[in-house]
Image: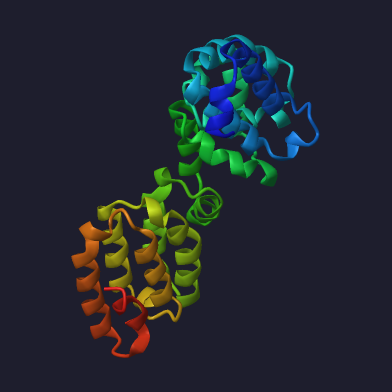
Amino acid sequence: MSKRYLTRLKRSLIPNLVAVLAKEIVLQKDAELASVPENVAAALSAVGDYYPTEYESELKESLPRYVAGTDDEKLWRILLLVGRDPRIWQWLDEPTRIRIRNLVQGKIKADQVSYVPLAFKVPDLAALLREKFDQFDDEKKEKFIAAVPVAELADEAIRIFADSGGWRTAESRAKNLIIPMAPEFSADQIRRILSAVESNSQIWDAADIPELMRNLFRLNVNMRHETLEDWRRFIDEVTALRESEHWNAIKALL
């Protein structure tokens, strides 16, 4: 929703706009908009940025009412709002919060997985998801992280990657666990990834790892300055382990 459009709206119409957008997200009344719930949530968030008082007042009043009339399949969509504005979690009534807790603790269907990263933005739900995750074996953890690459699971992603016992396993884990989180890794996490690669021949000797590490360097923009010397030291180490053109793709960036 454009800034120009929002600034032209009459303030008296804002509560109705908030109500319409919230109702659409939860109840899917419009067939065309039902296919793009993320866009509706983004529009509602934009309204909240420009008209915070009307936004908060109307959502507190209308959202619990709309949610009460929806089934569990559609209830997942409330996370589109909660993920953007975690305050909304407190605006829901306790019966609704219990329903959502039960959803994230239960079996999550394929078409519901995209909502899980949003649930991690709510401390109450994040704790439940982490408890559920911690009960998995490493194979299930790997699948979960690949489907839900959130920063809260980064340390586990690095640990599983570091334990790779074969070239193809290392490449698969780098692609599915490391690269999706690349922009979010801290400097310390980058250093641990570099250490994992250079200390495990099943990782550093895998054919696709140099290109994947190049992508990690390229995507981890925020930490690049802080970790540049670590990357240079890493290249010296792995080049000594395998003297060839294996690492030239990264060398060109350093």
Which residue occupies 65% across, 39% down?
A: 107
Considering the image in quadrants, where does the N terminus appear? top right
Please tell me which residue is depicted at 54% across the width and 17% down the height of the picture.
55
Q: Quadrant of the C terminus?
A: bottom left
In this view, which residue lies farthest toward the right? 31
Question: What is the residue that sits farthest to the bottom in this orientation?
Answer: 244
Nearest to the observer: residue 28 or residue 125: 28
- Which of the 4 image quarters holds residue 62? top right
User: What residue sits 74% from the left and 40% below the top?
Assistant: 35
The image position of residue 64, as x and y in percent, is 63, 13
Question: Is 39 situated above or below 217?
Answer: above
The answer to whether one can see residue 94 in this image is no
The one nearer the camera, 42 or 155, is 42
Residue 248 pos. (x, y %): 33, 83
In the image, is 13 to the left or to the right of 235? right
Give the x, y percent position of residue 209. 41, 75
- The mark tally for this picture is 0
Viewer-proximal residue, 30 or 230?
A: 30
Residue 112 located left or right of residue 32: left
* Image coords of residue 238 (percent x, y): 27, 79
